[in-house]
Image (cartoon, rainbow, N blue to C red):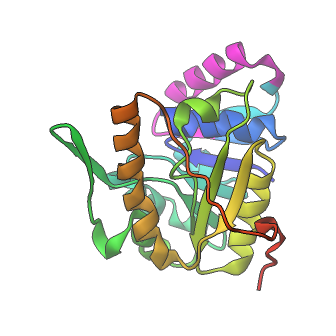
Amino acid sequence: MRIGIFGGTGPAGSGLAARLASTGYPTVIGSRSKERAAEKVDELLAAWPDLVGLLDAGDNAEAADCDLVVIATPWDSAARTAQENAAALEGKVVVSMANALVRVNKEFQPLVPPRGSVAAHVQAAVPHSHVVAAFHHLPAAELGNLDDPIDSDVLICGDDPAAVHLVSEIIEKFPGCRPLDAGELSNAMAIEAFTAVLLQLNVRYKTRVAPKLTGIKRDPRAVEPG
């Protein structure tokens, strides 16, 4: 399965691209500028030469031609970028990882985008795709540091159980990560907003936090698609 990333040149997108490639997924870093994407690929391959043959560069249209697509653009361009590539995304799983946030003085605050969440706005823009919300709380630096595992649960929500299951299988391959099915896409509002809390903790305690939940006795990765 080839995975394309819209906005793959940013810290979160490029970190995710490296992590996906490190687990064996051929990944296309997409951008409005293919040249910028190529520069980012060269930078990642210089740091992680084992990823040669698994990372490629393209514009967003080339990323949209992949089997699964992740949207890692800024939140206010996520739905527009998806809509621009709607024909290529039809029938595919599209992962929204953007958070609508603003910094006011020293505090991070969540914004309420159209339809309540970035993920829901993306789903409205590409109604014939299967939108899943995931990856919101993974620190970009840890994503891109392939020498270490990421000690984090990953909350996933979506209206298509098969799509959620597919994304869970991908996350399961990230060392240290545990995928958790957090319900339908309507829950993306809370998941995205909670990122503001995590960022505030980062500032206050000068660290990079990631969520870990207790009390789940069974293996959450055993959830089968409905």
Q: Residue at x 79, y 34 (%)?
A: 22
Q: Nearer the viewer, residue 199 or 226?
A: 199
**Magenta run includes residue 43:** yes
Q: Residue at x 76, y 65 (%)?
A: 166
Above or below residue 170? Residue 200 is: above
User: Residue 142: x percent and y percent?
Assistant: 60, 32
Residue at the far top in the pictured view: 46
User: As rendered, which of 216 and 44 lies closer to the eye?
Assistant: 216
- The quarter holding residue 57 reads top right
Residue 211: x percent and y percent? 56, 51
Asked whether the viewer can see residue 9, the reply is no
Viewer-proximal residue among 188 and 194 = 194
Q: Is residue 86 above or below residue 185?
A: above
Answer left or right for 46 relative to 195: right
Magenta stretch: residue 14 in it? no
Query: What's the magenta bit mostly, secondary-structure-wise?
Result: helix
Q: Is residue 47 above or below residue 159?
A: above
Q: Residue furthest left?
A: 105
**Total labels drawn:** 0
Residue 126 at least partly seen = yes
Counting from the top left corner in percent of width and height, residue 11 is at: 50, 32
Please give left or right for residue 69 compared with residue 102 in the image.
Answer: right
Percent across and percent down for residue 91 are: 66, 73
Q: Locate residue 107: give its quadrant.
A: top left
Residue drawn at the location 43% of the way across and 72% of the way down: 120
Question: Magenta region: which residues?
Answer: 29-50
Q: Quadrant of residue 226?
A: bottom right
